[in-house]
Image: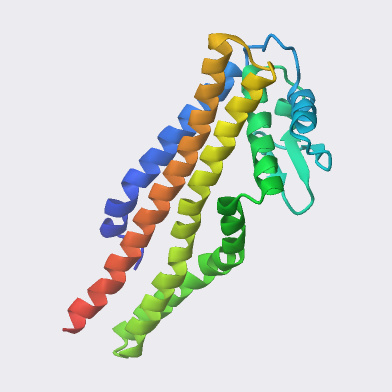
């Protein structure tokens, strides 16, 4: 019912974009992950310096397993850095560490887009499961001749749309964190010279593209469900 030619028509561009974005991120990180910064600070050391520079003394830095699993948890005030970032002195590591510190700054300032995205999390967690279940149930009931099925399917689409809203809300949060990272690295002298700045820009731009790709994917998937459920009404007429 879902994996058909129409689904591929909608989602093939998204799959291609995700593949290209993933390749670009890995390529950018690998390239600048081999270029040591002149400051010779590791990602962990840079994070500690930026925490002091920003006056965020309640923030802790901890290592986390995995590759590029770096994140900031506003609930625990812990900045998690993957081992490759925490222990590396590369331009890429400094860019990633500073980006996560940008999220810590947002949290400390009560940055509205970050708070709005956090408020969406419960709805998205429920909607990601419940939405497609309601769409499937509604389609099944509609094909069985029950008029109520269309309404249930549309309800599923509305709930599922929360994922697209979350992806849209995430974009300004991530772009702002990257802008903060560029400014912090430059102002503190952790990154110096046009070459290192170019590396930071490349890594952060590549990371931002992953969120653009996620938004495009969410929108196309939502449009597919809209077309699927919308077709029920046309068939019933």
Instruction: Give the percent coordinates (x, y) of residue 173.
Output: 55, 45
Observer able to see residue 3: no
Observer able to see residue 105: yes
- Is 237 left, or right, of 10 in this rendering? left
Looking at the figure, which quarter contains the C terminus? bottom left
Q: Residue at x 32, y 44 (%)?
A: 13
Instruction: Give the percent coordinates (x, y) of residue 196.
Output: 58, 13
Quadrant for residue 103, please give it: top right
Instruction: Give the percent coordinates (x, y) of residue 71.
Output: 68, 41
Name the one closer to the observer, 2 or 92. 92
Quadrant for residue 176, please give it: top right
Name the one closer to the observer, 64 or 110. 110
Image label count: 0
Quadrant for residue 212, please give it: top left
The scheme the figure's colours follow is rainbow
Q: Residue at x 75, y 24 (%)?
A: 46
- Is 75 left, or right, of 186 in this rendering? right
Instruction: Give the percent coordinates (x, y) of residue 11.
Output: 34, 51
Name the one closer to the observer, 228 or 55. 55
């Amino acid at each position: 019912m879902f994996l058909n030619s129409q689904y591929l028509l909608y989602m093939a561009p998204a799959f291609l974009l995700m593949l290209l974005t993933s390749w670009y991120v890995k390529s950018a990180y690998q390239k600048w992950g081999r270029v040591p910064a002149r400051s010779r600070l590791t990602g962990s050391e840079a994070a500690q310096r930026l925490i002091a520079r920003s006056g965020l003394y309640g923030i802790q830095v901890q290592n986390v397993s995995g590759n590029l699993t770096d994140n900031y948890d506003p609930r625990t005030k812990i900045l998690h850095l993957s081992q490759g970032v925490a222990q590396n002195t590369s331009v890429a590591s400094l860019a990633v560490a500073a980006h996560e510190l940008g999220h810590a700054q947002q949290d400390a300032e009560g940055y509205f887009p970050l708070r709005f995205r956090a408020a969406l999390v419960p709805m998205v967690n429920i909607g990601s499961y419940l939405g497609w279940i309601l769409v499937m149930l509604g389609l099944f009931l509609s094909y069985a001749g029950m008029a109520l099925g269309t309404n249930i399917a549309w309800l599923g689409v509305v709930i599922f749309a929360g994922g697209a809203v979350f992806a849209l809300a995430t974009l300004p949060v991530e772009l702002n964190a990257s802008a903060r990272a560029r400014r912090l690295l430059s102002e503190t002298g952790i990154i110096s010279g046009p070459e290192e700045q170019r590396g930071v820009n490349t890594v952060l731009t590549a990371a931002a593209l992953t969120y653009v790709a996620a938004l495009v994917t969410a929108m196309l998937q939502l449009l597919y469900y809209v077309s699927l459920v919308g077709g029920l009404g046309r068939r019933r007429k």
